[in-house]
Structures are given as C-alpha cells and as structure tokens.
Image (tube, rainbow, N blue to C red):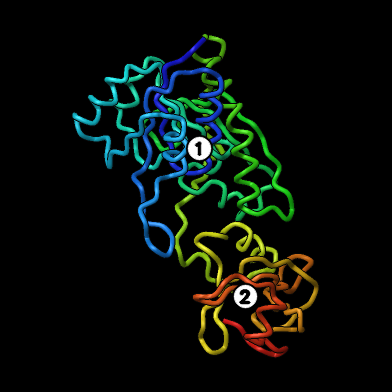
Amino acid sequence: MTLRLVFMGTPDFAVPVLKAFLEAGDEICAVYSQPPRPAGRGHRLTPSPVQAFAERHGLAVRHPTSLKSPQAQAEFAAWQADAAIVVAYGLLLPQAVLDAPKYGCFNLHASLLPRWRGAAPIQRALLAGDAETGVCAMKMDAGLDTGPVLDCARVAIGPRMTVSELHDELARAGAPLMLRAVHDYAAGRLEPQPQPAEGVTYAAKLARDEGRIDWTRPAVEIDRMVRALNPGPGTFFTAQNGERIKLLAAEPVHGGGAPGLVVDDAPAVACGPGGDFGALKLLKLQRAGKGAMSAAEFLRGFPLPKGTVLG
C-alpha cells in the first residue's frame, strides 16, 4: 500500500524517518520544516537537517512560521495527503491541520508515553536516571503528546550513555517503528490505544541555567547532568577567578571532602553525599573562546591544584 504523505520535521532525529518512508516507496508530496537559521561563526543561514535531506532528494520544502492562518491551513489541506508524519517539527498543529489528511497526523515521540510528554524527553530521561526509555508512534490530537499510541519500541539506557548516543539509538528504533505503525493503521491492521492516566510526567524545555553545576549534589546526579546536557545547553562551573568553565565529560569516583573542593591532581572534585561515589573526575573541559580539551591538556594552561574550591 503506497501512501501520499506530508512530512513535518526539523532536526537530525527526524531524518531517518523521512528516509524510511522514501525508501518504502511512499509519495512525499511536501516537506514542512523550520526556516533556515544562522549557524557557525559566520552566522550563515543554514537549512535544517530535514530540509537539506529533502532537497537532496528533490522534495518540495515549505517552512511557514505558523499554521494558524486560514491560508496556511488551506495550503496544507490542498496536498490531499493520506497522512502527515510529524517528527520534532517545532510548530503546534491546529485542529484544522490535524483533521486534513485522510487518516490523520502521526507523531514519533522520543519517550514511553505517558512518561516524558513535552519538549525534552531524551534529556529528561537521562537526568532522572531512568533505566530505559523508547519511542512511541502516536495518532495526534490537540493535546501535548496526549494522543492514542499505535506502537512503541523500548531502548535501554546504559550506565555511561550520553544524550547523543541515546538520541541516535532512539532515531534508529523510531524509523522502522513509524513506518510499520502508519502503514498498519492505514491498512486497518492496528488500532491506537489511549494512553494510561497514570504515570504522566512532563519533559519541560531545557533552560540555559540548568547546566550550572551545584557541587552539593551527589556525584552521580552531576554526572547525569553532564551526559544529558552536552553539547547543549551545556554544563559549567566557575573557577576561583570567576571564569565560567564548561564541563563536557566526567565520571563519578571514590573520594570526598567539602563540596566543590579539588581533592587530587586528576582532577577530582568533592560532591555532596549520596550513592557510592563522593567525587567527580573531570575528563573534558572548555574555556570560553577555546576548543574542548582533555583534563591533562586543560591543566597545562589552567591549573586546578588540589585544595582549589570551585563554584
């Protein structure tokens, strides 16, 4: 069964899903993506990963700033699509848009719904110390990730997994899941199931200041922050001179002392009580305007001797 589809997505996470539907032989009549944004040192306008992929494959790309106007909704309906496939698009879909395709609009969400509805489900799962997460194919309604679920795929969160690694695992799991679920629904082989009322949590959008390290927190919690928030919005602490230093990689180690105290030459920093590890070994750091460095490289130009207190 070949479907006529509108694809709506923006970041890297959405590209494998678009690729899967293309390779399956479905007709992608239009791609909607966020407009090009300034990027790099030259702040050159750069198309989203989805737009770049779509244009390489000769697909028409639209990037309206809103879908609320009657004109935008009429243009969307004019595609006469069987379904819309939505993956991290970045705009809310009004009811008129949700209702326009023959079978409706379908979203791939990066959590095991109803846990972690909202904007940052991958990071929030890591921050919370979840042992597993996953992806869900859902039929969209007007709520925030509240629609009935067609199918899910589970992904284990390894003890040292970073947000980039988890992102890639979920993207790989999501593409075949979404392809199968939408086709099965259109063929009448799959019935969406309402989400449970219990277990709802919200993955709020990440704020820049969430990356400020509080050394009174347990080392395992700070380690999860570092793995969840890099490359963006990033984790950081302040040196004794007040300079903000980015912490890009770390690991919990045995040790202890007053929170924020550098306790050895590794360097390891004492953290608050909790768990089996009392300190955090700094592995990769970055000063403003400089490149990322291993701890050994960093210390040659910016010593953090034992006894230093970090903020």
Mark 1 or 2, nearer chain start:
1
Q: Residue at x 64, y 72 (%)?
A: 293
* Residue at the (60%, 62%) spot, across then down: 225
Residue 310: image x %, image y %? 60, 83
Which residue is nearer to you in this view: 53 or 111?
A: 53
Q: In this view, does 164 lie above or below 196?
A: below
Residue 211, how many percent across, how many down? 53, 66
Q: Is residue 194 left or right of residue 166?
A: left
- What residue is pinned by disc 2? 215
Dot 2 falls on a residue whose secondary structure is: loop
User: 10 Å neighbourhood of mark 2: few (<14), some, or many (≥20)?
Assistant: many
Name the residue that disc number 1 marks.
Answer: 14
Q: In which quarter of the image is residue 38?
A: bottom left
Reply above or below: 246 against 54.
Answer: below
Question: From the image, which quarter does the C terminus lie in?
Answer: bottom right
- Amino acid at circle 1: Ala
Depth check, front residue: 148 or 126: 126
The kind of residue tagged 2 is: Trp
Locate residue 255: give its quadrant.
Answer: bottom right
